[in-house]
């Protein structure tokens, strides 16, 4: 039976941080696929995302305090599935998913060129919610680049792998 919470718009959240992996310091970029997100305030303009504490992106955002919300078109469903089913700790998700990295304008973080819109965010708060953390980001730069059909998570009985769009 489908969840009453679906469909939810799917986003790709990009992040960057200086971290230590296997004893070596390096700058690492990552992308995570999320469907748990929402606007949180008009003034100041805030946006909230919820990320599982075991996810690599959780560590990057906790360390750097910045992230980019990339709203993606339906055509990127394969890339969304890829980024949501692999850890970026040891791979370059931009390269492996075939997505183009571009630098954010107001924060030290990559964004996805193929996105139809984005919010560049500075994390101003994080709330522990059990196995997830809600990161509340102040939007410091935003753009709607194209008005296309957006990607939505469909039937939850497909374990998050079903996608749909709106007409």
Image: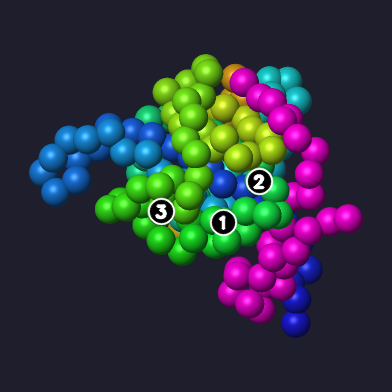
Q: Is residue 105 left or right of residue 165?
A: left
| Residue drawn at (57%, 35%) of the image | 113
Say whether marks 2 and 3 touch (CB < 8 Å). Answer: no
First of labels 1, 2 by sequence position? 2
Is 105 in front, or is 123? 105
First of labels 1, 3 by sequence position? 1
Read off the residue under disc 3.
96
| Residue 114 lies in quadrant | top right
Toward the left, the furthest residue is 23
Q: Give the image location of residue 8, x and y in percent.
A: 72, 57
Name the front one of labels 1 and 3.
3
Q: Give the image location of residue 17, x and y in percent.
A: 33, 33
Say whether marks 1 and 2 touch (CB < 8 Å). Answer: yes
Q: Give the image location of residue 31, x and y in percent.
A: 46, 46
Q: Residues within 10 Å of mark 1 (few under 14, many from 20)?
A: many
Quadrant in the picture for the N terminus: bottom right
Q: Is residue 40 left or right of residue 63?
A: right
Q: Is residue 134 visible?
A: no
The stretch drawn in magenta includes residue 143: yes
Read off the residue under disc 2.
72
Read off the residue under disc 1.
80
Name the front one of labels 2 and 3.
3
- The CA distance from mark 1 to mark 2 is 9 Å
First of labels 2, 3 by sequence position? 2
Q: Residues within 10 Å of mark 3 (few under 14, many from 20)?
A: few
Q: Could you tell me which secondary element the residue under label 1 belongs to?
A: helix
Total labels: the figure holds 3
**In the rendered structure, which segment of residues is drawn in magenta?**
141-167
Q: Could you tell me which secondary element the residue under label 3 belongs to?
A: helix
- Whether 122 is drawn above or below 56: the answer is above
């Amino acid at each position: 039976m489908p969840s009453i919470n679906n469909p939810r718009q799917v986003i790709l959240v990009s992040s960057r941080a200086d971290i230590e992996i296997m004893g070596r310091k390096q700058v690492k970029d990552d992308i995570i696929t999320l469907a748990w997100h929402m606007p949180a305030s008009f003034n100041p303009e805030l946006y909230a995302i919820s990320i599982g504490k075991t996810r690599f992106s959780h560590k990057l955002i906790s360390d750097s305090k910045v992230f980019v919300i990339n709203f993606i078109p339906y055509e990127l469903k394969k890339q969304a599935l890829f980024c949501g089913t692999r850890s970026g700790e040891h791979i370059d998700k931009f390269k492996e998913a075939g997505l183009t990295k571009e630098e954010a304008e107001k924060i030290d973080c990559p964004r996805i060129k193929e996105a139809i819109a984005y919010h560049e965010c500075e994390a101003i708060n994080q709330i522990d919610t059990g196995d997830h953390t809600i990161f509340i980001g102040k939007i410091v730069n935003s753009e709607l680049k194209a008005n296309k059909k957006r990607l939505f998570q469909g039937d939850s009985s497909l374990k998050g792998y079903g996608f749909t769009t709106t007409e």
